Amino acid sequence: MTGKPAITLDLAPSLEATLFDEELLARLASLGTLTRTVPGGDTARRQQADILVTGWGSSPLPAARADAGRVRFIAHSAGSVRHLVPKSLLSDGVRLTHASAGMARSVAEAALYFTLGQLRSMHHVDRAMRAAHDWEEARSPGLGRTVSGTRIGVVGASRVGRVYIELVRALGATVAVYDPYLSAEEAEQLGVSLMPLETLLRSCPVVALHAPVTDETRGMLTAERLALIPEGGILVNTARSALLDTAALTRMLREGLFSASLDVFDDEPLPADSELWDLPGVVLTPHIAGATHHSHRSQGTIVVEEIERHVQGRPLLHEVLPETYDRLA
């Protein structure tokens, strides 16, 4: 690239502050002319950008290249991109990168926390101890289970899924994976066994969802498949609720067939009248699995480093290509 490009941050000020410290902003400013707009704000300024930095809340770009303005490079500071950047722009020469790798460890650690807590029934213990102020009542769930020696099923060997696999295997778990895009060689490198989805659900007392929502995965955990989870099993979902049948999941949780830790929901915020609030075997968090100081700064760092590579003509590390676009979130 010749000359200094126009770099526009299409971010809410609060998000910019969490992603970029002074050093990162200085690095960005050294690469081009830095301007700002807020999501849904100055469309003309966004169209005048050579490099556009987007994030949560940014408006989708138009599908037609002529309507997208000068933009040649989009650096998305979060993970999901298909709702924001149409595939047609990539086919017309716009390059796209994203910073989902910056959140992978935070989400995987949250999934590990949920797994550990559910195996030891910590949510039951905490609630019983607070409600009854009774030592023995709090001990009523009985003996828990350890990760070591537990077979854990992972649906989706995504970036997050691979970090989660690394974490639970380090604690001694045996891991099975369902992912039609994971080769036998990659599975061997990860130290996991490949299984059909139905086999995994039947045979793993812990099932962790780490797949993106695509045409292939949307609703793949049907009522029939959820019913395969062993009685007393555990479901951990830090991915997307669209992967499963929420009505069927709610019914099975109500019946106590298995327990679940859920960070994602069909409607967010979770409606006040949702039955999930009151189900005893459920741990609920408000879509915060990836939200840590470390992950946000890592996302900002990835954005800056990818823009540096682009400006300097070096290969990108996190580029979204037309042939991989449909498999992303």
Image: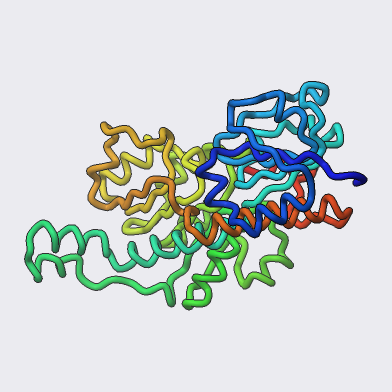
- What colouring does the structure picture have? rainbow
Frontmost residue, 110 versus 57: 57
Quarter of the rendering occupied by the C terminus: top right
Residue pictured at 59% horizontal, 33% vertical: 38
Q: How many marks?
A: 0
Is residue 124 depicted above or below 73 in this figure? below
Residue 167: x and y in percent read 52, 71
Position above or below: 327 against 125? above
Find residue 316 and report its horizontal and vertical position in percent.
80, 54
- The residue lying at 38 percent from left, 38 percent from top is 248
Q: Residue at x 62, y 72 (%)?
A: 191
Judge whether residue 157 can be spotted in this image.
no
Percent x, y for residue 26? 69, 55
Residue 306 horizontal side relative to residue 22, left or right: right
Q: Is residue 276 left or right of residue 132?
A: right
Residue sitting at the far right? 2
Quarter of the rendering containing residue 321: top right
> Does residue 17 appear in this view?
yes
Q: Is residue 34 left or right of residue 18?
A: right
Residue 203 position in % (x across, y down): 46, 61
**Which of the 4 image quadrants contains residue 312?**
bottom right
**Image point 30% across, 50% down: which residue?**
282
